[in-house]
Amino acid sequence: MCSVNEPAAAPAALPPAGLDADDLLGNVLLSRPDRLWTAVLARPRCEKVTAQHCERFGLPHYLPLRREVRRYQRRNVEFQLPMFHGYLFVQLAGHSDRELLNVCHRVVRVLPVDALQEARLLEELRSLRVFELASRIVPVTVAPELVAGREVRIVSGPFHGVRGIVERRLKSTRVTVNLEMLGQSVSVEADLGDLEMVES
């Protein structure tokens, strides 16, 4: 076991609707010609330690977190947990960066990626960042990837501009952003009036 999850700070308000996810991450989620973003599988409960290792060695990385509240002896304790168990995302520039990453001895596997896959991954990570920020004030669910359904764009509210797959439930509509590389998805409730169909 690598680390115990620490209680999170008080939730912050969402940024203004339509704020670009690149701005939210200080322009970290950018494509660079000599580097590729990819998913990295870490040992169980080692995601945060691996992210700290990346920070120490100057490797661009992104560890999506979600807020979870648990009740302990009549009080609520808030945690920031990795959104995808075992995974974080790192931008690597060949063999030397992989060696730096492996120095921490907590990496199980680096998923192979090409330039085309990286472009799709970056788009998904930018949408994922909006969901990460939203998890501070609304429940966000991580689930296996959804294949069926129509692609939509959210046109108003805190998720403005996010594209995802719509899934209808009995009395609510759920919009999902798939992270194809990991075969998982993130979803949130949305009003039908806030959605528009994306032309294929």
Image (cartoon, grey):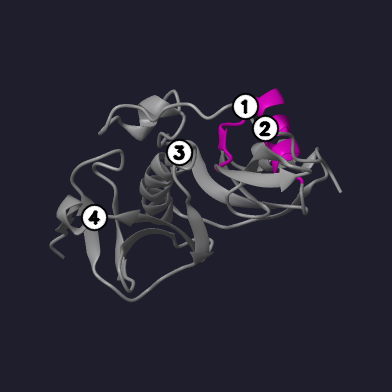
Residue 57 visible in the displayed image: no
Nearer to me, 185 or 69: 69
Disc assigned to residue 70: none
Q: Residues within 10 Å of mark 3 (few under 14, many from 20)?
A: few
Question: What is the CA distance from the residue labelled 1 to the residue labelled 2?
Answer: 22 Å
Residue bearing the label numbered 1: 9
The residue sitting at the front extreme is: 74
Q: Is residue 16 above or below residue 51?
A: above
Mark positioned earlier in the residue sequence (3 or 1): 1
- 136 on left or right of 195: right
Q: Which mark is residue 191?
A: 4
- Chain-order first, disc 1 or disc 2: 1
Q: Nearer the viewer, mark 3 or mark 2?
A: 3
Q: Residue at x 47, y 51 (%)?
A: 140
Q: Which residues lie in the magenta part?
A: 46-64
Q: Picture coordinates of residue 88 (x, y %)?
A: 61, 46
Q: Amino acid at mark 1?
A: Ala
- Give SS at disc 1: loop
Does residue 122 show up magenta in the picture?
no
Q: Which residue is mark 3?
A: 137
State which tag comes first along the sequence, 3 or 4: 3
Q: CA distance from mark 3 to mark 4?
A: 17 Å
Of badges 1 and 2, the one in the foreground is 1
Amino acid type for the residue under numbered disc 3: Ile
The amino acid beneath tag 4 is Asp
Q: Secondary structure at mark 2?
A: helix
> Along the horizontal axis of the image, is 88 left or right of 140?
right
